[in-house]
Image (cartoon, grey):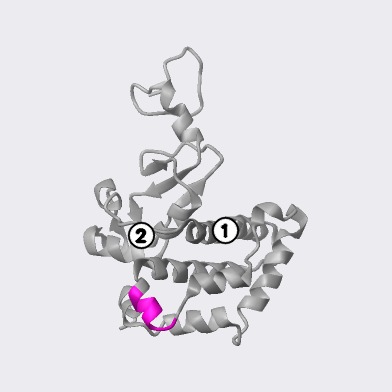
């Protein structure tokens, strides 16, 4: 029903809305859907109001959305949610609330948040360039997501990852990934492109570590490669 204020709005809210909860929607949050065929958690800093096919996690941050969009969290949902047709899951809130979030140090959280913010920027840039017909860089986004997933694996399975001689967080720190918020808008894409060309080189230690990560049994099970 519309808000009962005497003012005509062009959108609708739940019945008996409480105006005091507006600030919760307008604050940074993670938006999550009910029906998914892959992780589709979105980080919203622009104050969108989702419909009734979505949930929100208030007081959330980029670290949380990075973990939720990982293969680890998705594997958990595939084991607990109702399996629908064509690969879709009915990810009810009770199941999504049960996703275990691994502990992380402040440095680890900062590394993940930096990559998430770069990924959000690249996603928006890709969508804009698709509409305009201008060439874009999907490989950069895919590689950033690969690095992000590697870090999340290290959080969930430190013994397995470290036992294989892999220290992905250390390598990311050494790589000095750029903070998208400190780069002028006109230079952001070029900066990310240059960093991608460096880090994705087959001889770069981070690329080598990410390739080796894919050989671990735990990773292969989660990603369905066994």
Which residue shows up at 50% across the image and 23% down it? Answer: 9
Where is residue 80 shown, x and y percent of the image?
A: 22, 60
Where is residue 2 shown, x and y percent of the image?
A: 42, 22
Give the secondary structure at mark 1.
Answer: helix
Taking the image as drawn, is residue 134 in sight? no
Q: Give the range drawn in magenta.
A: 159-165
How many marks the image carries: the answer is 2
* Dot 2 crowding, Cα within 10 Å, few <14, some 14–19, many 20+: few
Q: Which of 157 and 97 is in front in this view?
A: 157
Indicate left or right for 186 with 84 as reference: right
Q: In this view, does 3 lie above or below 207?
A: above
Which quadrant holds residue 177?
bottom right
* Dot 1 crowding, Cα within 10 Å, few <14, some 14–19, many 20+: some
**Residue furthest right as drawn:** 186
- Numbered circle sitting on residue 102: 2
Q: Quadrant of the N terminus?
A: top left
Give the secondary structure at mark 2.
Answer: loop
Badge 1 is on which residue? 114
Which residue shows up at 34% across the image and 62% down it? Answer: 73
Residue 181 in the magenta stretch? The answer is: no
Which residue shows up at 62% across the image and 72% down it? Answer: 175
């Amino acid at each position: 029903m519309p808000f009962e204020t005497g003012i005509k709005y062009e959108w609708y809210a739940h019945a008996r809305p409480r105006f005091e909860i507006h600030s919760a929607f307008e604050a940074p949050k993670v938006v999550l859907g009910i029906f998914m065929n892959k992780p589709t958690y979105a980080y919203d800093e622009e104050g969108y109001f989702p419909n009734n096919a979505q949930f929100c996690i208030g007081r959330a941050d980029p670290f949380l959305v990075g973990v939720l969009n990982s293969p680890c969290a998705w594997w958990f949902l595939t084991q607990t949610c109702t399996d629908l047709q064509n690969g879709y899951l009915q990810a009810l809130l009770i199941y999504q609330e049960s996703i275990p979030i691994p502990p992380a140090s402040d440095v680890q959280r900062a590394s993940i948040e930096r990559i998430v913010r770069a990924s959000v920027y690249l996603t928006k840039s890709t969508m804009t360039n698709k509409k305009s017909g201008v060439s874009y860089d999907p490989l950069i986004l895919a590689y950033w997501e690969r690095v992000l997933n590697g870090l999340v694996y290290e959080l969930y399975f430190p013994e397995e990852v470290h036992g294989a001689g892999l220290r992905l967080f250390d390598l990311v720190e050494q790589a000095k990934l750029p903070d998208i918020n400190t780069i002028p808008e006109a230079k952001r894409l070029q900066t990310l492109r240059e960093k991608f060309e460096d880090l994705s080189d087959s001889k770069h230690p981070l690329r080598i570590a990410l390739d080796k990560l894919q050989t671990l049994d735990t990773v292969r099970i989660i990603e369905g490669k066994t």
